[in-house]
Image (spheres, grey):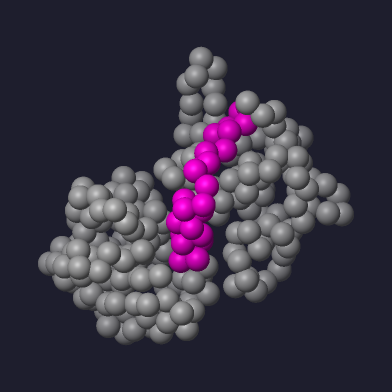
């Protein structure tokens, strides 16, 4: 897997490279937007870690240009932003970024995000079913969009964080399956998770707020006492 790191702060760029090379990724560094586009054209990386504030061309512009000229190997783009730095524009992801990370971040967090994105790309290769649909919800993994199905074929986009999106996709990949907290952690964080498994409960609570009509009596995400959680909804 080839990763292009676009970051003008050399220390950060090298830290990212060391972190990813420890995980056996092959990395290149570009320190401004124009250099990034040059390397992108020559090397066709699988994933681009793209800082927002860059000399010459900023990250949003680089992202837009890459998405405007689709290549056979459409790279995943992970945006880096400093806190408060136009996060809204990045979160909107209208530029075509797949995910974003706010600085400062830990190496563990970075590796988890990179792995999650590349897992998605591997999945593209082996199966074409990138949409999960139940009676009330649709998750489109390619477009990274989750929607609530309304009557008359209308739909309402759910505003989910990446974690909530991954949680919902995991549930919808196997309705009715009971997941332990540890199994959900494996799915969402991979092997890089260190911490209290109760962190799952926090994300379940947030996701319920966004999808349940009554969070006190959940219809879709059910607690299975002593085990974990399951998702229930009729199949379409
Ligand atoms: Ca920068």
Is 20 positioned to the left or the right of 35 in the image? right
Q: Quadrant of residue 7?
A: bottom left
Residue 113 visible to the viewer? no
Residue 121 colored magenta?
Answer: yes
| Residue at x 19% of width, y 53% of height | 65
Q: Quadrant of the N terminus?
A: bottom left
Q: Position of residue 53 (x, y in %)?
A: 24, 66
Look at the picture and state if 108 lies above or below 118.
below
Q: Nearer the viewer, residue 191 or 70?
A: 70
Q: Nearer the viewer, residue 31 or 105?
A: 31
Q: Give the residue at the far top of this rendering.
A: 152
Look at the picture and state if 144 lies above or below 151.
below
| Residue at x 48% of width, y 26% of height | 155
Q: Nearer the viewer, residue 119 or 111?
A: 119
Q: Position of residue 233 (x, y in %)?
A: 69, 32
Look at the picture and state if 221 lies above or below 98.
above
Q: Position of residue 18 (x, y in %)?
A: 41, 84
Residue 146 visible to the viewer? yes
Q: Quadrant of residue 175?
A: top right
Q: Nearer the viewer, residue 17 or 200?
A: 17
Q: What range of the chain is rendered magenta? A: 114-138
Is 138 positioned to the left or the right of 226 in the image? left
Residue 139 colored magenta?
Answer: no
Q: Position of residue 135 (x, y in %)?
A: 63, 27
Is 110 positioned to the left or the right of 46 in the image? right
| Residue at x 21% of width, y 59% of height | 62
| Residue at x 65% of width, y 74% of height | 194
């Amino acid at each position: 897997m080839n990763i292009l790191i676009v970051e003008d702060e050399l220390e950060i760029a090298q830290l990212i490279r060391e972190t990813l090379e420890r995980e056996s990724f092959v990395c290149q560094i570009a320190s401004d937007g124009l250099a990034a586009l040059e390397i992108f054209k020559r090397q066709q990386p699988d994933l681009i870690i793209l800082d927002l504030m860059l000399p010459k061309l900023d990250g949003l512009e680089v992202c837009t240009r890459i998405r405007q000229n689709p290549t056979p190997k459409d790279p995943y783009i992970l945006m880096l932003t400093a806190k408060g730095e136009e996060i809204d524009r990045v979160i909107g992801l209208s530029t075509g970024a797949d995910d974003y990370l706010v600085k400062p971040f830990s190496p563990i967090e970075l590796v988890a995000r990179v792995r999650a994105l590349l897992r998605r790309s591997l999945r593209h290769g082996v199966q074409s079913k990138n949409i999960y649909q139940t009676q009330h919800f649709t998750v489109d993994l390619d477009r990274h969009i989750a929607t609530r199905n309304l009557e008359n074929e209308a739909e309402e986009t759910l505003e989910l964080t990446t974690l909530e999106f991954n949680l919902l996709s995991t549930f919808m990949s196997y309705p009715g399956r009971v997941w332990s907290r540890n199994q959900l952690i494996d799915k969402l964080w991979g092997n890089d998770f260190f911490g209290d498994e109760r962190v799952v409960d926090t994300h379940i609570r947030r996701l319920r707020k966004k999808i349940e009509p009554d969070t006190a009596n959940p219809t879709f995400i059910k607690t299975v006492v002593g085990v974990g959680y399951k998702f229930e909804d009729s199949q379409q």
